[in-house]
Structures are given as structure tokens and as C-alpha cells.
Image (cartoon, helix red, strand yellow):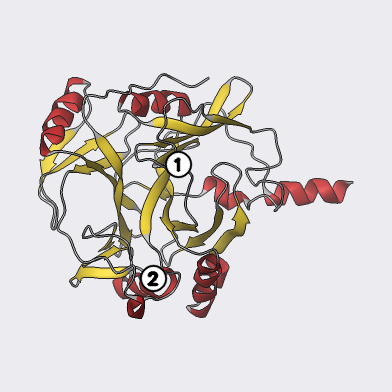
Amino acid sequence: MLPPVNLRPSFNITRSSHVRLTVADLAESRNFYVSALGLVVSDEDERTCYLRGLAEACHHSLVLELDEEGAGSCQRIGFRVFFDEDLDIAYAWFRDRGLPAEWVDMPYQGRTLHVSDPVGTPLELCAHMETRPRLHIDFEHYKGAHAQRLDHFQTFAPNTYELTAFYGELGFRNSEYLAHGDTLLSAFMYRKGTCLDLAIVENTGPALHHFAYTVSESRDIFTACDWAGILGYGEGVERGPGRHGPGGMLFTYLRDPDGHRVEVFNSHYQTIDTEVEPVRWDAGSLSTNVRWGLPALEKWYFEASPFVGVKQVPPAQVPQPMTLERFLLEQSAH
């Protein structure tokens, strides 16, 4: 069911690191992430805003880039590697496989490498960033949901198995997965010692479904929803609050002013031990909720932020999840 994992990969990716989004109104987007989520501004100018969570020492985990015409897209998702030499190995590794690899200069980061996976997902790898003081116990700085740190990304890919095999070669292990019969539909993969850095879901892609920040308390999830409503984005509270089956965490999903989807949730369990087997979830069940809660709206399953300049490809079979619309229709028929 799951492709093999290389536990001794050629270079060492350590964790999900940062995401770069395009926005139409920098001030409005900044206000959403600072006031609703509680992120902290590290630096900013008239076209770019760099933000981080309260528990993050590295300079940024979210970068907002002004682009009035191309707003609503994702530039890249970023991963950290352990050493600078990992970047040199990664450069050769991607080039040897006919995949793009290019050195770039990025503000507040050390040497940075731009690469793409086999379906075209644009990735940014770096080993170092400038640092700022952690603010997790500076309670006078707390706003909104008190978001602590960036945790993971969820992307769409036209073939989950093939892309899971690719990231497995890079050392990404599987904590849980969603399958229908012998078909792998979603894989929850990680490099750090929790259950998720990258979720891959079979759908038209590549695209960024969401990125996620952790919070310390379950009430912070409701605070995110409250502040979204105060700021005029109440209809953008798209799913939850609820509890996932995969991962088991409490969550809510919000849409920002440009339609980017961000999840706020209360963290994960530990997965560092190699003898623990991945958990299988059956796609034939009602939804990925556990024990309670209705399915998500259809748009939650299919809408996502496109990557700038990357062509999307549909899967061989269009997904047919149990959406809220379908669930209510079937209930009314009874």
C-alpha cells in the first residue's frame, strides 16, 4: 500500500519551514494574520511582510508578497535542511533526476536552493535564517489565536502514490494514510518528530490546500474564529472547530483575504520511533472526522491555492468525497 521509505536519505530535510504567498492588499493580509492568528511581524516593507509564530526563533514562517494581479497564489513552500552541505547534495540530487535546481538569494536566509518535485511543486530549501527573540512567554505581545509555530503543509497531487514514493526517498516517513481498497488517496508524511510535515492528497495539482499553525490551548481555536468574524471574515471560517480522525487534533480552517486556507490546531503526537506502523483510514467512511462532526463543504475538498506559473494536472479519477452537500442530500432522500 505504501511505498518504501529511505531512512538514510542523501541529504537531511529536517522540517517544514515557511511558505510564500501572493496577496492583493498587503495591509489587509497583514492585519488578518496578526489580529486573527496572532503572528508577529519580523520585518516588512511596502511590498513584503515577514511573519513568525510566537514560539519561533527563526525570522519567518510566512511571507506575504504584494502582487495585485497574481494574488491568491503560492510562490513556494519551504523546508529546512540540517547543514549547508545538504544543500550542495540536494542540488546535485535534483539535477541528476532531471528536476529543476537553482541557487537564489533570499532576504534573511542563508544559501537558498529552489527545486521542484516531479509534479512541479516549487520548493525552497535553506539551512539557516536570521533569528529573532522567541515571544512565547512575552504575553504582552499576544493577539488573536496566539499562533505558536508553523507545523505542516497539505498539497494536491494527481497521483498520491508516486509523489509519496518521491518524498519517501527523501526520508519522509508516513504516520497515517487514507486509502480506498488498494488505492492510496492521501499520505501524511513527516521529518520532524511529530506526525506531519507534508500531507499529499490526490486531486488536481500541484496546489497548496492549506498550511497550519499550532496553538497552545483549545480555546485559541475559537479565538481565531472570533477574530475572523470581528475582522469581517466570518464566512471564511470554512470548517470546524472540529476534531480530525488522522492526527486526532482539534482544528479549524480559515480563508484569508485572498482565499488562502490556513489551519489552526492544537498540535500532534510523537512519531520518532521507527517500529510504529502507519495508521490506515478507510475513505469509505463518512469523513475524516472522528466520532462526531459533519463532513466538510465541497469547496474544502477541491479549492486550493495554485502555485505561480505551474501547470495543474487532474488525477486519473476525480475524487468523490462525502461532502456536506452530498450528505445532506442523501439524508433528505431518506
State the image coordinates of residue 256 (x, y, percent, origin top left): 44, 64
Q: Nearer the viewer, mark 2 or mark 1?
A: 1
Residue drawn where x is 39% and y is 71% of the image:
38
**In contact (CB < 8 Å): disc 2 and disc 1:** no
Q: Seen from this angle, which residue lies furthest right?
A: 334
Q: Position of residue 186 (x, y in %)?
A: 52, 34
Q: Is residue 71 visible?
A: yes
42 shown above or below 167: below
- Please state which amino acid type lies under the numbered disc 1: Gln
Asked which secondary structure carries label 1, the reply is: loop
- Residue 147 appears in which quarter of the rendering? bottom left
Disc 2 marks which amino acid? Gly
Above/below status of 96 relative to 237: above
Q: Secondary structure at mark 2?
A: loop
Residue in view at x 41 percent, y 19 percent: 4
- Tell me if I can see residue 72 in this picture: no
Label 1 crowd (10 A; few <14 / some 14-19 / many >=20): few
Residue named by callout 1: 270
Can you give x and y, in whole percent of width and height, for residue 230 in the image? 51, 80
Give whichever of 225, 327 is nearer the camera. Answer: 225
Q: Residue at x 33, y 51 (%)?
A: 74
Asked which quadrant contains residue 179, the reply is: top right
From the viewer's perspective, tell me whether residue 333 is left or right of residue 242: right
Q: Which mark is residue 38?
A: 2
Q: Which mark is drawn over residue 201?
A: none
Is residue 65 shown above or below 287?
below
